[in-house]
């Protein structure tokens, strides 16, 4: 069963806010990758990704986040993650991805 993923982008003064809601998995990860990479390419600001509405993420999704970090770093930009639920934050910690991003509570 294909799950829903919604991505909303808002240009703020000092950063681009990205709100992700739904599930990031093998079925929806391409949509997330295309959107994040497009935002990084088009803007010269850091990204703040609001994950408070993110219900689920699998290893494919974690890989997308790692790739987005690498791409942002090429442009000397940072990615902030906000609103991570405890179960999702735990995945970032276990995989070591928490060291790449600035995680805000």
Image (cartoon, grey):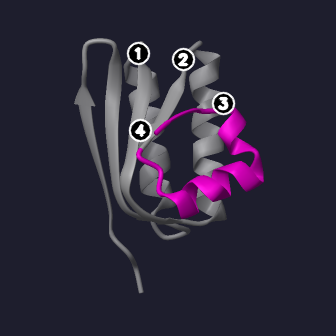
Q: Which residue is mark 1?
A: 45
Residue drawn 58% across and 44% down?
Answer: 65
Q: Is tag 4's residue or tag 3's residue first in the polypeptide sequence?
A: 4
Q: Is tag 3's residue or tag 1's residue first in the polypeptide sequence?
A: 1
Q: Which residue is mark 2?
A: 77
Say whether residue 104 is magenta. Answer: yes
Please state the horizontal and vertical placement of residue 59, each as a whole percent of the image. 66, 62
Residue drawn 64% across and 40% down?
Answer: 67
Mark seen at residue 70: 3
Q: Nearer the viewer, residue 87 or 67?
A: 87
Outermost bottom residue: 1
Q: Is tag 2's residue or tag 1's residue first in the polypeptide sequence?
A: 1
Relative to 103, say whether 92 is above or below.
Answer: below
Of discs 1 and 4, which sits in the foreground?
Answer: 4
Q: Which residue is mark 4?
A: 49
Q: Residues within 10 Å of mark 3 (few under 14, many from 20)?
A: some
Q: Which residues are magenta?
A: 83-105
Q: CB atoms at circles 2 and 1 under 8 Å apart? A: yes
Asked whether, in this view, residue 66 is left or right of residue 44, the answer is right
């Amino acid at each position: 069963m294909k799950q829903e993923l919604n991505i909303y982008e808002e240009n703020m003064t000092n950063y681009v806010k990205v709100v992700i809601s739904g599930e990031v998995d093998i079925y929806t990860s391409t949509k997330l990758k295309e959107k994040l990479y497009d935002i990084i390419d088009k803007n010269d600001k850091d990204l703040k990704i609001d994950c408070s509405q993110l219900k689920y993420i699998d290893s494919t999704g974690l890989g997308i986040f790692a790739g987005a970090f690498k791409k942002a770093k090429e442009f000397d930009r940072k990615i902030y993650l906000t609103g991570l639920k405890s179960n999702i934050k735990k995945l970032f910690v276990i995989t070591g991805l928490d060291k790449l991003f600035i995680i805000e509570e």
